[in-house]
Image: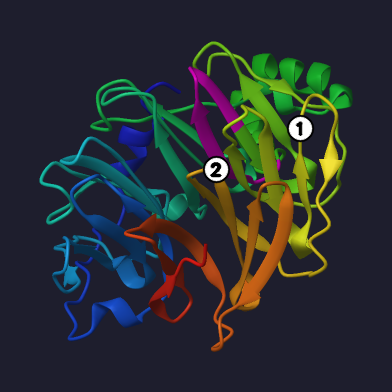
Amino acid sequence: MAHLAAAESSDQIAPQSALMVAHPEQTLFTDITDNGDALIAVGKHGTIIYKKAEQNWTQAEVPIQSLLTAVTFKGSDTGWACGHDASILKTTDGGKTWAVKQYLPKLEKPCLDIEFIDQQHGFAVGAYGMFFETFDGGESWTKRFINEFVHPDDVDYLNDLKEQDPEGYELETAFILPHFNRLLVADNKLYLVGEMGLVAKSEDVGKTWQKFEQFYRGSFFAIDEMANSELLVAGLRGNAFMGIGEQIEQLKTQKTATINAITEQDNVIYMFANSGVIFTLKNGKLTSTQLKNGHSILAGVVKNNRLILATEQGITEVEVKN
């Protein structure tokens, strides 16, 4: 199991490099981050773009055409991205060039998020309980199965199957867990949200996990820790909840747009949703605005008093209203 990712990579089809285009900032983007030196966004057909200060967006050299779903950095130079085909990429030059560290198209599962504790220890999660971990800066990845998320009725069955039929165990566990949609690293704790109302935390750097009691049956796609250390989770049809694990409060969003991502700047929380909806939570008051073009927003960051948004039709900038 420990070297499954490396073993499976050996007989996979070689990836094709992303095509360089004239206006790379006008395609579908799924995530965006600020590494302190530049903005980096990832998206369709392996497209990665970066931008410094007042410069134009520049397309990076990417040796893969898979849809990329998430990007993260530790420092301004070292970053990682992940996406479909269980692909994981790494950069050491601030996002200008990328190298493939994992590519498993035969697995037929997308990686949906990637986060690092530090420059060596990281996690990549995705569909049907996909969970990979690295201890060497993303050079190699170990596949894990999170037993704590197995339904109690299935625990004994899986334990017996693992002993008696290892191949059957691999097949059974391939699809038994819910989708893992988003990771959060906060104060040496890890949080994970996903399908079927999954919200979980780890207090030992991912070794073990504890599920919160289910309070919503739909999928969560976003999680963030607010300035007061309260957790905020959000997902399908505008459902958002604060105070997870304590006194849970459902926010009255008044709209049914699915929330894809959350970011916070200067005690103001922004939740980015489908149909171009932006929810803003400031001083306890929740308001919403909508992009005129109605393009779904998959992620966003705040930069120089502007929201830089990754949308289904490219990068969009919106002035922050105080």
| Left or right: 234 as drawn, with respect to 320 | right
Mark 2: amino acid:
Asn
Quadrant where the N terminus sits is: top left
Tell me residue 66's x, y (percent). Answer: 36, 64
Disc 2 is placed on an element classified as loop
- Which stretch appears magenta? 178-191
Residue at horizontal 76%, vertical 31%? 244
315 or 11: nearer the viewer: 315
Give me the residue at 64% from left, 74% from top: 289
Q: Earlier in the sequence, mark 1 or mark 2?
A: 1
Label 1 environment density (alpha carbons within 10 Å; few <14, some 14–19, many ≥20): some
Is 258 within the magenta? Answer: no
Say if 208 sits above or below 56 in the image: above
**Front residue (pair 110, 254):** 254
Residue that carries the numbered disc 1 in the rendered image: 243
Horizontally, residue 312 falls left or right of residue 45, namely right
- At a point 54% along the width and 88% down the height, the residue shown is 293
Is 179 a magenta residue?
A: yes
Given the current orientation, which residue lies at the most extreme top position?
204
Q: Quadrant of residue 290?
A: bottom right
- Relative height, residue 273 to residue 140 (above, below): below
Disc 2 designates what residue? 267
* Most common SS among magenta residues: strand
How far apart marks 1 and 2 lie (CA) works out to: 16 Å
Which structural element holds mark 1? loop
Mark nearer the viewer, 1 or 2: 2
Q: Position of residue 263 (x, y in %)?
A: 51, 49
> Could you say where residue 117 lies in the image, as x and y percent from the top left?
38, 24
